[in-house]
Amino acid sequence: MEIVQKYTNNYHRNMDELNTLPPSIEPHASAHIIEQEAMAKQILKNGFAYEVNGSVYFDVEKYSQTNNYGKLSGRKLEDLQTNTRELTGQSEKKNPFDFALWKKAEPEHIMRWPSEWSNGFPGWHLECSVMSTKYLGDKFDIHGGGLDLQFPHHECEIAQSKAAKGEDAVKYWMHNNLITIEGQKMSKSLGNFIKLDELFSGKHDKLEKAYSPMVVRFFILQAHYRSTLDFSNKALQASEKGLQRLFNGLETLKKLKPTAKSSIEINTLKEKCFKALNDDLNTPILIAHLFDGIKMINQINTDDETISKEDLKELQSFYKLLVFDILGLKVEKETAGSDEKFEQAVNLLLNIRLEAKKNKDFATSDKIRDELNKIGIIVKDKKDGFEWEIK
RNA sequence: GGUCGCGUGGCCGAGUGGCUUAGGCAACGGUCUGCAAAACCGUGUACAGCGGUUCGAAUCCGCUCGCGACCUCCA
């Protein structure tokens, strides 16, 4: 239990760092043994399962006579039949593709609960069917998961629900694809496995530097969820710069000065963005449109375009909605930046630099800028002053 | 071996019959700047290969090559 808790806590912290909304309920399979037993019983009663030696198996062949097993993953029963390998040792199952609803525990098995069939444990697939319908209702809209779970896990969930309750529990299945690294899949055996903590700290042989959680989030959003995403230092650094550009644009958006009329059209932009979201959550397209808008914002800033007061307000709330609320990005500022005294000190230095510049003492002004740069403070000259930010 | 999917410019990554210069990063030229940075303007490079369908294909079909996921009762 202690080990489980350790990894659970770690996972929660990582999700929080990535600015992922916490789930309302995080049920545990081991806390729903009774419900799982009940569902197995129901399936048995409906004639889609059979008991052998204290174990209960789902009868896929029987189920297939009236249902389409394999409809989610596009598999056919005949293919499964011919391609399932023979397992060593005797099998109690009628068919290799049958799966366990309740499994009798071997003596060495730690997890075990009493049931009318044996001391044992529920089959893997049952927990998801049971817990999802318990908390979301007999019919719910979206069931997510990684592509690797599509078969057999989700296929079996569908079969179980149908066999127990006569209808599908899930309306839409959404499967996200997997991440590859430098063209290869991430796996322990290849030694190219990177944990989130390592990514955030940069402490990994494969990493050239640390990548902040928001960079990672933005990186992932730049690919469609159904595509594989290739992970590399180059790609992450490109995302880092891109995100910076996006956030710089948002800073500019805050300070834009409206004029009487708009030379730009913001409704078209809005429509395009929502269209992308409605098209199977196409976040890369959405982000491309957002960048088009950023360009627009920068052009307004350099007086190449104009924006009215109403449009500006509209645009500001639109970007807030899209970037922060929908894409779930957030500005990661080092706490030092918000320290008032620190801020005053930097401003003081830069004012001295400004004076040096006026006196054409560029040696001094460059020195201040370069030294600040070294500490990680980026100075940007403006027409009538300066701006700075912490890298 | 079987099933399914993928292969897009230097990199990442959208697009699925004709006109998206997708977008980001990188590169090059320019504007601005004392010089930078940022920003803006402009430029190039592309659809794995071969064949087919079509007036027209990155997009449809076939084959070949390369890569991946699943097919392991591990949740």
Image (tube, rainbow, N blue to C red):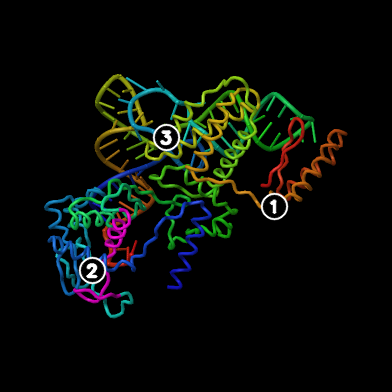
Q: Check if mark 3 and mark 1 are on a common chain.
A: yes
**Label 2 marks which chain's residue?**
A
Q: Within the image, what quadrant is residue A31 found in?
A: bottom left
Looking at the image, which residue is at 22% across and 58% down?
A: A160
Q: Nearer the viewer, residue A255 or A155?
A: A255
Amino acid type at circle 2 is Trp
Which label belongs to residue A336? 1
* Residue at far bottom of view: A107
Quadrant location of the N terminus of chain A in the rendered image: bottom left
Q: Quadrant of residue A352?
A: top right
**Is A97 above or below relative to A269?**
below
Task: Give the SS element for disc 3.
Answer: helix
Residue, x 15% and y 64% (percent of image)?
A: A44
Which residue is labeled 3 in the image? A276
Image spot of residue A389 (x, y percent): 69, 44
Instruction: Establish if A190 lies above or below A168.
Output: below
Q: CA distance from mark 3 to mark 2?
A: 44 Å
Which residue is tagged 2? Answer: A102
Label 1, label 2: how many angstroms apart (C-alpha)?
A: 56 Å
Check the residue under mark 3 and report the chain it is in.
A
Q: Earlier in the sequence, mark 3 or mark 1?
A: 3
Residue drawn at x 54%, y 48% is A214
Confirm whether the magenta stretch covers residue A340: no
